[in-house]
Image (cartoon, rainbow, N blue to C red):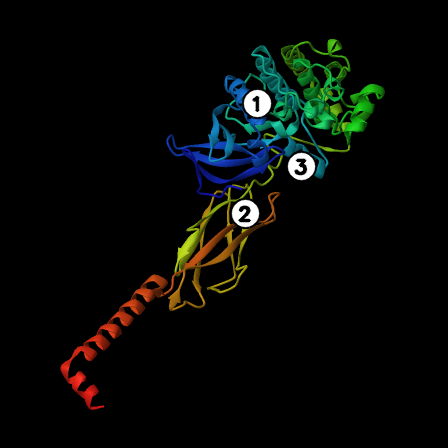
Amino acid sequence: MLQSGQHIENYRIDGVIGEGGMGTIYRATDVNLMRPVAIKVMHGDLADDPAFQERFLHEARAAARLDHPSIVRIYHFGREGGLLYIVMELVDGLSLGAYLRQLAKLNQVVRLEETLSLIAQAADALGYAHRHGVIHRDVKPDNILVKRIDAAVRPGDPPLLAMVTDFGLAKLHEVEGDATAGMMMGTLPYMSPEQVLNLPIDGRSDIYSLGVVLYQLVTGKLPLNIRTPESAVYAHQYESIVAPRMVHAGVPPAIEAVIIRALARRPENRYQSAEELAADLRRAATALGGQEAEVFAAETDSTIVSMVTEFPTPARRLEWSMQPREIRGEGICRVELFNNAPTPQTINLMLETPEGGLYADSAQKQITLVPGQKGIVDFYLLPMKQSLIGRKRRWPFVMQVAPTPLQGDGIQSIEGAVISTPRVPVWLALLFLALFLLVCGLTLWLLVSLPIVDSLLSLL
């Protein structure tokens, strides 16, 4: 795990955004251009695999060529110090997956017109990528980011923008000539039948996956109950998808028809391009009358909310850093915090000394920050004992930060150390001892060499 303040080339790590199956995503700053970026650093076992490295570079080059408003841009990718990483645009928003989890928790459903607009934008992005020979392979809510914008992309649309990320990265798990090449690549509930059954795939596979996301947003449920690879194989061969209006009676027939076509088991029965899906979604949104929207709201036990105004944005990670990481002798360890959540946060800072031997002015401190506020907390540290002669001693400590209410990231921690330097280093003590012995030897030699000493010795 990289720590705040570390650098990868010209990128300074500022904090952790999240972690996935292939790597950790960090918030960072391009110190040359002074712009915020997101960096996905692959796990070490993958980065050390030559076959994975080759595929990573191939897929990164393909994804970097994509330039679309609804696709997260890739700025750079490379290898340094054993790290394999990709630098992306930092989107000021949350994933659709985070919204869906919040909706389920609060028993809420997004307004229908907002859902149709967001999925149409994601379909635009997929259609553009497919035309450029890139298949996503892992379309799911966590790979669709949603941000609020000042003005709508199209007249009549809500001021929301869907942005698709992680293009082609699911393919990285494949290894040519390896027995694992036939493994399922993707996220089980959102995978198309051809993915699950290990059949050739094209852009229509992404259309199916986006159809699952649309079904989930409209009904609050997944179309198939898939939990294991075995259940996925069985469901895609023998089970039928429950019609959306059977789950939520208020779903307009035109929208149900779009969902059913997107989720057709056979690719030839689906939309043949993502642009077709986007066009039908926009036609359905245009034809959506006030009465249909009222019926959609009335026929559900859930609360209808808007991502633009009413929907509460889940609190994002508290950003913080600690400087310096190493204190020489004694000094102040400064913790800088920034609350980028939409609600006030009370942060508990706890200092632990795994090996003991350190004095601190306090083992625990607390600070409360309003949204957008920065704060500083200082801890004074020094070793309890400092040796007169010896080697340097490293006294480790761990700084833990726990926001209240506790965020999804949990308690975060950073390690540091106090370096205790002896008053007299070993080399200097040995030098003094050598000089003392030398002086003693010279003194004895001089005494023995004097004539009066010889006379006294002869008398004895």
Mark 2 lies on a secondary structure that is: loop
Q: Are marks 1 and 3 in contact (CB under 8 Å)?
A: no
For label 3, the SS is: helix
Instruction: Residue 116 in the image: state x and y as whole percent.
Output: 66, 20
The residue mark sitting in front, 1 or 2, is 1
Where residue 55 is drawn, which disc sits there?
1
Q: Are marks 1 and 2 in contact (CB under 8 Å)?
A: no
Residue in view at x 56 percent, y 27 percent = 50
Q: Is residue 96 left or right of residue 258?
A: left
- Is residue 62 something one can see in this rendering? yes
Whole-number angstrom distance, CA of label 1 to CA of label 2: 44 Å
Where residue 431 sits in the image (x, y, percent)? 30, 65
User: Label 3, on which residue?
Assistant: 102
Q: Residue at x 56, y 36 (%)?
A: 44
| Distance of label 2 from label 3 (alpha carbons) | 19 Å
Q: Extreme bottom residue here?
A: 459
Crowding at label 3, few (<14), some or many (≥20) Cα neighbours within 10 Å? some
Q: At label 3, which amino acid type do we have?
A: Gln
Q: Which residue is mark 2?
A: 344
Where residue 432 appears, as percent x and y from the top left, is: 29, 68
Dot placed on the residue nearer the N-terminal end, 1 or 2: 1
Q: Image quarter for residue 423?
A: bottom left
Quarter-of-image position of residue 223: top right
13 vs 277: above or below: below
- Furthest-front residue in this view: 458
Camera-side residue: 434 or 104? 434
* Disc 1, SS: helix
Position of 434 relative to 378 (above/below) = below
Amino acid tagged 1: Arg
Q: CA distance from mark 1 to mark 3?
A: 35 Å
